[in-house]
Image: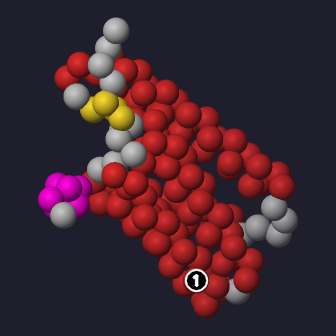
Amino acid sequence: MAYRNKVPFHRQPMFRVIVLQATVGVLIGLLFGLVQGWTAAYSALLGGLVAVIPNVYFTYKAFQYFGARSIAVIVQSFWAGEMGKLILTAVFFAVLFLGVKPLNVFAVFSGYILVQITSATSLLLTKSFLKR
């Protein structure tokens, strides 16, 4: 039986990245609200949430185990986290476009893409995040 070392969610290495993504999502929503109005504000915020919530799921699943004896469980949890992230993203976009009216499509995709860019660029800073 594999030895499994679990890490609490708030102690996982990517937790600060998730907090940064959520903050950027809220700021993008506020910016769109100031520039284009209420519909653009909640559209951008929802687009950011479509990026953040699946990333939270992936982070929870992928980084919950550590240690050399847990390698099989680590690989399995990364796989489950990535598949869950893709499925959640597709479902959230479907629900968003079918269920929310009126919707500013430009703001939705802007919020989603900017939060994803935050995710990608914050990975460059992860080493400094881990040192704190």
Name the side, left or right, on which 42 lies relative to 56. right
Where does residue 3 sit, x and y in percent of width and height? 30, 19
Q: Amino acid at mark 1?
A: Leu
Does 9 appear above or below 25?
above
Where does residue 26 sit, x and y in percent of width and height? 54, 74
Quadrant, the C terminus: bottom left
Please tell me whether residue 129 belongs to the stretch shown in magenta: yes
Return the residue found at the far bottom: 34
Quadrant, the N terminus: top left
Magenta span of residues: 126-131
Residue at image location 82% in from the left, 69% down from the top: 102
Q: Residue 6, located in which quarter of the rendered image?
A: top left
Main SS type for the magenta part?
helix
Residue at image location 60% in from the left, 44% down from the top: 89
Query: Neighbour class for label 1 at 10 Å: few (<14), some, many (≥20)?
Result: some
Does 94 appear above or below 80?
below
Camera-side residue of 130 and 33: 130
Q: Residue 74, located in which quarter of the rendered image?
A: top left
Where does residue 106 sit, x and y in percent of width and height? 63, 67
- Look at the image and tell me whether residue 109 can be seen: no
Where does residue 14 sit, x and y in percent of width and height? 34, 52
- Tally of numbered tags: 1
Element assignment for label 1: helix
Name the side, left or right, on which 44 lies relative to 9. right
Please tell me whether residue 71 belongs to the stretch shown in magenta: no
